[in-house]
Amino acid sequence: MLRLVVRRLLQLIPTLLGLSVLLFIWLNRLPGGPAAAMLGERATAADKARIEAALGLDQPVWIQYGRFLKRLSELNLGVSTQTGQPVWDEFTRAFPATVELGISAMIIAIAVGVPLGYFAARRRGSWLDVTAVSGSLVGICIPVFFLAFLLKAVFAVQLGWFPSFGRQTTGIDATEVTGFYVLDGILTGEFDAAWDAAMHLVLPALALSSIPLAIITRMTRASVLEVLGEDYVRTAESKGLSRQVVRGRHVLRNALLPVVTAIGLLTGGLLSGAVLTESVFAFGGIGSFIKTAIDERDYPVLVGFIMFIAAAYVVINLLVDLAYSLIDPRVRVH
Amino acid sequence: MALLSVDELTVTFTQRGRRDVKAVSGVSFDVDQGQVVGLVGESGCGKSVTSLALMGLLPSRGVKVGGRADFDGTDLLTLSGRRMRDLRGSQLAMIFQDPLSSLNPVVPIGVQVTEILTRHRRLKGEAARKEAASLLDRVGIPDPDRRLKEYPHQLSGGMRQRALIAMAVACAPRLLIADEPTTALDVTIQAQILELLKELVDQEGTALLMITHDLGVVAGLCDQVNVLYAGKVVESAARRELFEAPTHPYANGLLGSIPRLDAPRGEPLRPVRGSINDTIAWEDGCAFAPRCDHYTLECLQGTPVLGEPRKPGHQVRCVNPVLSGGAAELRRSVLPEPDEVPGADAAADGTGPEGDGPVEKADPAEKDAVETAGTAEKEAGA
């Protein structure tokens, strides 16, 4: 088990190095650049050259890359060209919001998708099944930003049930510990602050959960249908076991194997996919930060972010594999 | 009274917009305490569906079950789901064909054995584990304590089937249904598993309903044999009686098709020509008529009834039974000489009018069956 973890973490190094090479080539080919973005349209060539020299962008790309690697080896992602703050600090400020949003969305998707898919399969052809299948199709098709606007217009603006923007009501008395506001509120005993943060999470998390919810529902349904036809379920029935044991131990446990894999891949996607939802709800996460970074050609932030997402993907998939080896003895690592 | 008495069992699969499919059309047979009864027939003749109907394991939708199946006085076919659950695993148990796919791949063998003990015998924890270990030991699995912790993929094919048998006999059922329990196993393991089943049946007095297409299994194990064709019993006799004097042309053809080790080299195999798809509805006549060598117009005058043309207790559903001699003699008298039939290939697709010609090669599955037939017959003789 430990060997697998170490090997997979070591695999991160070539993955990230390869990715960084691609990134540098790509950024080098992009038109414009931080200097043009900072100075605007009427910048003189001399001004641009001065800024590029200050940022080190006048150097050949391999020298820039060498510097980047050197900084990276000191765990330093550089300084944002928009804010002048270290990229690492910007990330640690913005990431908890995104992670909190992503986890909430995933919890909704799993908590609703798995039971829905399961019951749709058990009552195949019933109204529940038809609703689940067609509903999940809508969930996959509808653009997230549109759904986000819709939810905001109905539940925040019209009905006023939920706040329409931000992570917490401004001016609320809250102590920051981890940067995860709901968790902070619970840890410090400030339950009103935790509740406030949770209410702020509902709409963006719902919007963000639509695609994973739809995928998990469909996968669970298909998987349960397949398992219901397996011989070992018939064996379990032939033993006269109670319905609960047949369903829990013999059907669900097997049916959830492929769903776990999907959950891992979807979680990785949520981190990078939160951008649109966050900007609709002015949720101060990494998404809105990255959006500005793209506009401003903030190379250090972009490189850092993309590498971070890549690393997160690898780690999440490692976690999925570890979880998988716990629930499926056939792939257990010794 | 018989322990299990199946009377005119019918199973019909219905699907909206399609014609109903009658998988079992009026099967009747009895199983006595301590008796081994064989249900023999080719694929698609309704033998597995019969067993699933008895166990109440057919899907509830799209299936119509008719007739009666009295098990110790209660009709299994009309029992409520809950009562059936109580009976299954404790009074009635079943062993399936493919031991790998019949075991849950992600649950340890131990749990799969103990869960049935917990359900029907209220054994829990250490007591259940101990009982499970002794069950595995009883079915001949060495080092049971270690095996209990293992998963199905870590066991060999024969051991998996032994584990399934351990689960089936865990609560000392009165009737054990084995649906082709040796088909997925190689020949030596087949013999061991059959031996084990025989032992368990002898020790416990359990009745065994053996479902198989393998005449070797029948020869080695069964007391009474029912030959099924297109969802009906066409011949029912004691084992010795059936093997010595197969009277229905189908049973006769089946036994005649077994190649013999003492046959001269190069002697062609003699299959029953055609396939189970060449059939007519039982209402119109004998379903075997299109493949039968004894076929006359009389065969098309409605369903033939079970008669006893040869001996009391030896039932045959045929208007032109084979009454002269045994299979070997019949083979010579009925089938044409090999060189008389030129289109040998016609036999394979069953389209040729004289498709009962010789086929040069046996397919591997058939060969396997033949080999067990050999060993099992020897055992039966011993």
Image (cartoon, coloured by chain):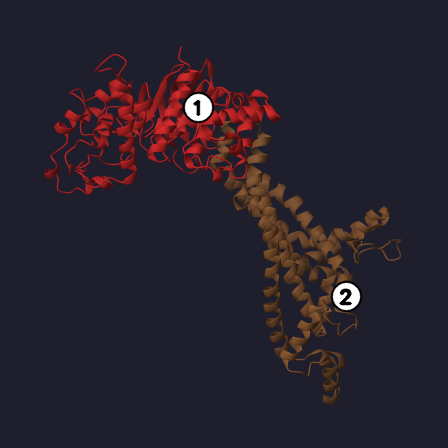
Viewport quadrant of the C terminus of chain B? top left
Mark 2 residue type: Glu
A210 sits left or right of B146 in the view: right
Say which colour chain A has.
brown
Pointers 1 and 2 in contact (CB under 8 A)? no
Vertical side of A320 occupied by B72: above or below: above
The x, y position of residue B316, in whole percent, is 26, 19
Q: Position of residue B205 (x, y in %)?
A: 42, 15
- Rendered location of residue B12, percent (x, y): 40, 29
Residue drawn at point x = 25 percent, y = 12 percent: B312
Amino acid type shown at disc 1: Leu
Answer few, some or many: residues within 10 Å of disc 2's Cα (few below 14, many 20 plus, some between 14 and 19).
Answer: some
Left/right placement of residue A283 relative to residue A189 reads: left
Chain B, colour shown: red
Give the residue at mark 1. B54
The residue singled out by tag 2 in the image is A90
Assign the N terminus of chain B to one quadrant of the image.
Answer: top left
Which chain is disc 1 placed on? Answer: B
Does residue A333 appear left or right of residue B8 in this picture?
Answer: right
Residue A155 versus residue B3 in the image, above or below? below
Nearer the observer, B374 or B22: B374
Mark 1 Cα within 10 Å, few/some/many (few <14, many 20+)?
many
Q: Chain of mark 2?
A: A
Residue at mark 1 to residue at mark 2: CA–CA distance: 69 Å
